[in-house]
Structures are given as C-alpha cells and as structure tokens.
Image (tube, rainbow, N blue to C red):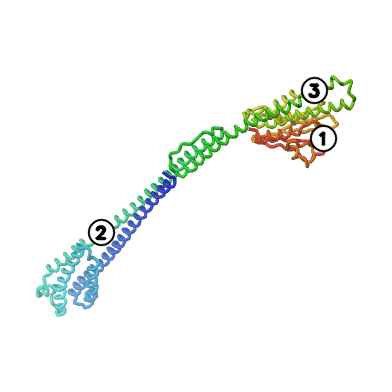
Amino acid sequence: MKISVRIFLGFGLMTLLIFVSNLINIYASNLIENNIEEFNQSETVLRKSLELQKAIIDQETGLRGYLLTGIDSFKQPIVASDPIIKANFAELTILLKDNPEQINRIYRIKDIFFKWKTGYSNILLNKRKFLLKSDDLTDFLNATSVNPRFAKTLVDEIRSLWIAFDNREHDVRNLKFEIQSSTVRNAKLINILTLIAAGFIAISSTILLIRYLINRLNVLTKAADEVFNGNYELKIEDKKNDELRPLIQSFNKMSNEIQSNFKTLNENIAELEQFNWITSHDMKEPLRMISLYSEKVLILNEDKLDYNSIQDIKYIQKNVRSMINLINDVLEYVRSNDEDELKKTVLVDDIVKKLIEQNRELIENTNTKLEISNLKFEICCNEKILLQVFQNLLINSIKYRSDKDPILKIYASTDAKETIISFKDNGIGIDDEYQEKVFVMFQRLHDANDAEGTGIGLSICKKIINKMGGTIWVQPGLNVGTIIHIKIPTT
C-alpha cells in the first residue's frame, strides 16, 4: 500500500469521526432546541392555567361576597374575569392542540365552568338584586331553583381536573428537562469518545507511518553502508509498491553502475601498476648500466684521464643517481594511494621515536638537534603512512638547512576531534609566495646544485594527509626557518 494511501486513510477516518461527531452535535442541538420550545410552551400553559384558575376563583369569590352582602363592588371581579377566562380558554385550546389528554381536560373544565356559570352563578346574580336586606339568604336560595350542592359538585370537579391538569403538565416539564439533561450528557460523552478515538487514530497512524518509513529507510541505510564498505554487488529486493520504490530502484541502478565502474577501475589500476613496474624497470635498467659502465671507465682509466674528464664522468653519475631517485619518488607517490587503510590507536611519541631510530645516522652526521614536546597522546591513524610523512619532513628540514647546525622542534596540540602536529626548523625557510607551490609535484624552489631532491616529497605528504581527511600547510610570516603544520582527525 502506498504511503499516500495510508496517510489518506488515516486522515479520512479522523475526518469521518469528526463528521459523525458534528452530526451528533447537530442532532443534539436540534433536540435540545425542540425541548426548550416545548419547555417554554409548557411554561406558558402553566401560566395561562394559573391565570384561568385565578379568574375562576375570582368568579366564585365575587359571587359569594355579592350573595352575602348584596354590595355591587363584589360583582366587579366577576365582570373583570369574564374576558380573561374566555381568552385563556382560547389560548390553551391552541397551545394544547397536539396534546389530546390535556386539551380534553380543558374542554371538560370549560364545559363544567359554563354549566356552573349559566346554571348557578348567573341565576343567583340576577335574583340577588331583588332580595331585601331583611330577607334570609337561606330562604332566598330555597326560593330559587338552584341547588347549592350541585354547584359545589361542579366546583369540586373543576378543582380535581385542574389538579390533574397541573400534575400532568409538571410531569411533562420534568420529562423534557430530563431528556434535555440526558441529551447534553450523551453529547458530551460522544464528543469525548470521538475526540479520544480521533486522537488514538492520529497517534497510532503517525507511529505506524513513522515506523514504516524508518524500517524502509533503514533498509536503504544498511544497503548504502554495505556498498560503502565495498559490497558493490548488493541489490535490495523490494516488493512493496510505495513511493520509496523508485528510490530503491535508483539505488539498485546506482549499485550496478558503481560495480561496473569499480570493476573497470580495478582493471585500469592493475594495468597502470603493471605499466609502472615495467616503465620503472625499463627506465632504471639503462640508468644502472650507464652508472655501472661510467664507474668502470673511471676505475680502469682514472690515471689516463685528465681532471675535466673525471669531473664529467662524476657529473654523469650524479645525474644518473638523481634520475633513479626521481623514478623512485614518482613510484612512491603513485603507491601512496594504495597504502593499507587499516587504522589503529597509536602513541604519537612512539611514531617519532621510530622516526629518530630510522634516521639516527643522518641526524648524527648532520649534527641535527631534535626538540620533542607534548607528544604523549594517542590518535587513531595508519601508523605506516604517518611515519612516511614525518620522514619526508625530517629529511626536508635537514636538506634545506642554513649554515648553522639544524634544529628541528616537533610539538603538537590535540582535542577530542582533531590533532595538530607541527615541525619547526631553523633552515633557509620558504617565502610566503611559494608556500602553496611547494606542495605541487616537481616544483623546486632551489637549484639542484644547492640541494639534492626531486620536488616530490611534500607532494607525497600532502596526498597522504588529504587522504587521512586532514590538511597540511606552511605557516606564513616567518623571517627565519619554516613551520609546517599537519591537522588530522584524532579518531
């Protein structure tokens, strides 16, 4: 499965969860909104019911007061409550149109009330105005066709219906409130669960994707290390059809190309080594013959030759030796690429001791004084090729000495990352303008008659140090002598 598909699936699943959560929230919001509307409607019903009950009670109270006293002011609540009763009955009928149980109670209350109104209240009101103050109210009631017990029964029935009506409306309100609270709780719970699920999916998807990418990249990294270590035949077997497959295919192509180029390079190196050996042998052999026969001529005919002839033969021998040295140095420069790459931890002081031991005769014959300091530390390097660099620098310091006895100071500074080893002499020095030129092959700053040499020694040093990952340079601005610094990795 492609990486982009994995990302899309994870993102799509999170989006789906969020979408479902939003739908649930919308549903819960609509449900709460409907509950609030119904709750408000129930509040209005209860308020209208209370107003209606109060108006009916006003009717009953006003009737009782007027009957007892005959004072007209007691009729005022009756007159005032009539439109209120009529309006509230009408409004309750509209509000409860979708509630058959409650609207039936309202219809029943309305019928009973108007039955009480027409069959009891209105009759008594009309006849009470003819009642004299001296007349007994009981006799008055007995004289009418109204039955007080009938009126009480109607009023009690109205009260009973109002109690049932109010209880039912309160039950509806409590139910709506409980539904609303439950909806809010459930919506919160669903949102929390959705958030947890989305977070879990996001974290899980990210971890799985990272692990997948790390595993895929580790395969490439290990393969690259294998190729770096010389396994040019390595091929990555990959059956996963993802975005990294073209990269792996390119890696395999690169590995094939490296293998082919390395094979060609090895063939060329082998041919070059064979050519170098043949060339050096064929070039040195005639020179050795020239040297041999010139020496033979000098030995056999020294008493017969004049001074100039003898000097000419010695000049020939000197140039032959120079040519042989030049050939040897060129071969050494070429071989410096093929030195063993194995590194080990060595004490710098031990390398310098080997240098002194190998060149003891040269040092003593030239009265060279060596001053060694700060070399008792370890570095990880190829001891053999570093000793070769030290050897060339020692010989150069002695070869290009001044008219004073040579003094060579070898000192160093080091830390965890790099080491700088310095060679300071009191020789003839190197002008600042030539401090880069001295590291170029065959570049000599002095005449061959002044000092023997081929102009390759420092080139070999530079090549070796560069191969070790370091640098070598001449310190500028000196009036006397030369300081050459070598900076190489400590580990």
Q: Nearer the viewer, residue 452 or 309?
A: 309
Name the quadrant containing residue 385: top right
Spot the residue most to the top.
Answer: 300
Identified by mark 1, the residue type is: Asp
Within-10-Å neighbours for mark 3: few <14, some 14–19, many 20+ = few
Q: Say which element carries label 1.
A: loop
Quarter of the image with the N terminus is: top left
Horizontal relation, residue 34 to residue 105: left or right: right
- Residue type at the position of mark 2: Val
Which residue is identified by label 2?
Answer: 172
Q: Position of residue 406 (x, y in %)?
A: 81, 29
Residue for badge 1: 447
User: Does residue 176 appear in this view?
Assistant: yes
Identify which residue is drawn at 86% across, 31% down: 403
- Confirm or deny contact between disc 1 and disc 2 (CB under 8 A): no
**How far apart, in angstroms, are the residues tagged by discs 3 and 1?**
27 Å
Quarter of the rendering occupied by the C terminus:
top right
Residue at the spot 57% in from the left edge and 33% down from the top edge: 263
Residue 55 at least partly seen = no
Q: Residue at x 19, y 62 (%)?
A: 101
Check disc 3 and report the residue beneath it: 293
Marks 3 and 2, Cα distance to the nearest angstrom?
134 Å
Give the image location of residue 6, x and y in percent.
42, 46
Instruction: Give the SS element for disc 2.
Output: helix
Amino acid at dot 3 = Tyr
Residue 486, position as x, y percentages in the image: 71, 35
Mark 3 or 1: the one toward you: 3
